[in-house]
Image (tube, rainbow, N blue to C red):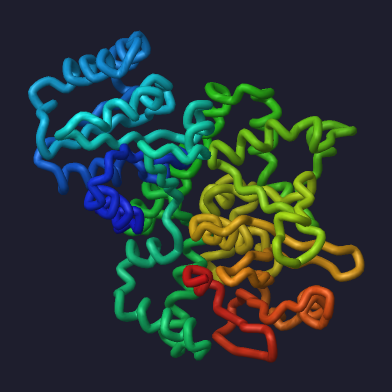
Amino acid sequence: MSLKRKITRQLEEWKSSRASRALLVTGARQVGKSYIVDEFASRNYEHYVRFDLIEQPDLLSAMEGCRNADELFMVLSAFGGSRFIAGDTCVFIDEVQECKEAITYIKYLVQREGYDFILSGSLLGIELQDIRSQPVGYLRTIEMFPLDFEEFCWALDVGDEALSYVRGCFESSTSVIGPIHERLLSLFHQYLLVGGMPAAVDEFARSGNVAEVKRIQNDIVILYRADISKYAETSKLVVKDVYDQLPAQLDSQSKRFSFASLAPKGTYERYSEEFVWLADAGVALPVINVTEPRHPLKMSEQRSFFKLFANDVGLLCAMSEVDVAKSILSDELGVNYGSIYENAVAQELKCHGYKLRFFRNKSIGELDFVIETGNGQVLPIEVKSGKSYKRHSALTKVLSSQNYRIEKAVVLCEGNVSLAEKILYLPVYMVMYL
């Protein structure tokens, strides 16, 4: 089936802008980059040429031997054959992290009339890590993520009218009618299990076969571990160890990553490169501690103190030793699954463009997330998986403190919409509208 993705709108905007810029679609492996570009280019161009630098090693070898943009263009035209025609033509180079020459010469290729160039690659190669942070005028970069919860709802045939109604409830802070609330809550529980990897979502939407979904997720985890062996320039064994420890570390009482698990005297300074690699590769989401919930949050970051989530909540469940599926499907959810809820919220906030941070203070306690809104206000977010979601001593202390002057806070929970002074209680599925 064809999964509806929000990134399609960005691709259409790029094409209609007619600016002399190539498009680079980045993201972790298996989030659907190749599929969405392939579908978009096939539908929107008269001529379409696709290259894959992993499946075509002979092309990769020829490209690596190019000394300038003209030679690269000649190689592409030779391998593209009769499809490589100037006009309304899209040239798609997939797995571009394999060849830095493609990035180096792209600013010259985009000057050729009659061709639009789209590059796609995983956040694994050094060249992509460097270029995505540079404000270059010849390349627009879009980062792609697993399906967010709203996209998951689309895949499970939730109608636009129902989602529009729920958005209206969110915007007006009014409760959602019972049947729709229960339906979306149930879907969110399924999302915790399935996650947002397109292959897993597609299988679940078609068959509902949870065992097959887990097989797909396990295959992706194996692929990620193989990528670490291939691409990680730091200690590969340590990077693998950090990745494999995600479920256990999040299952601890504090959920904060303990460096003692890597070595008796392990420190952030000793292993910082390994954590940075996982974050840059897009397979893990660090949530950094701030010492004060005060704008600007960046000023109080404590980067050596963090939680580390998986890039996809479904993969986290697949990596867990306990049988999460049975608990989720039998509705036996509670505080023991708080880390899974938080993982889903973290990846949703990440794909909405928020920096991931949490607040912890010995005398006050801990807030799961703190984000900055468009007007510079700090918004605390608590995630509650159990029924006692109105018990939140740390949040209460922060809101009553004159030092922080927090105007409002959000608690994402299993309940319906309600408002109590400064605290807005939202059903956890409404994270898609934050």
Q: Is residue 165 above or below residue 81?
A: below
**Residue drawn at (47%, 47%), measured in percent from left and top?**
214
Residue placed most toward the observer, 243 or 135: 135
Residue situated furthest right in the rendering: 363
Q: Is residue 308 left or right of residue 432?
A: right
Residue placed most toward the observer, 79 or 222: 79
- Quarter of the figure with residue 74: top left
What percent of the width, then of the height, locates residue 161? 30, 80
What percent of the width, then of the height, locates residue 213? 43, 49
Q: How many marks?
A: 0
**Residue drawn at (75%, 55%), measured in percent from left and top?**
299
Q: Is residue 417 left or right of residue 210?
A: right
What percent of the width, then of the height, locates residue 186? 47, 72
- Quarter of the figure with residue 45: top left
Question: Is residue 1 in view from this perspective?
Answer: no
**Residue drawn at (54%, 24%), measured in percent from left and top?**
231
Q: Is residue 89 above or below residue 381?
A: above
Question: Is residue 296 in view from this perspective?
Answer: yes
What percent of the width, then of the height, locates residue 227? 52, 28
**Residue drawn at (33%, 34%), measured in percent from left and top?**
119
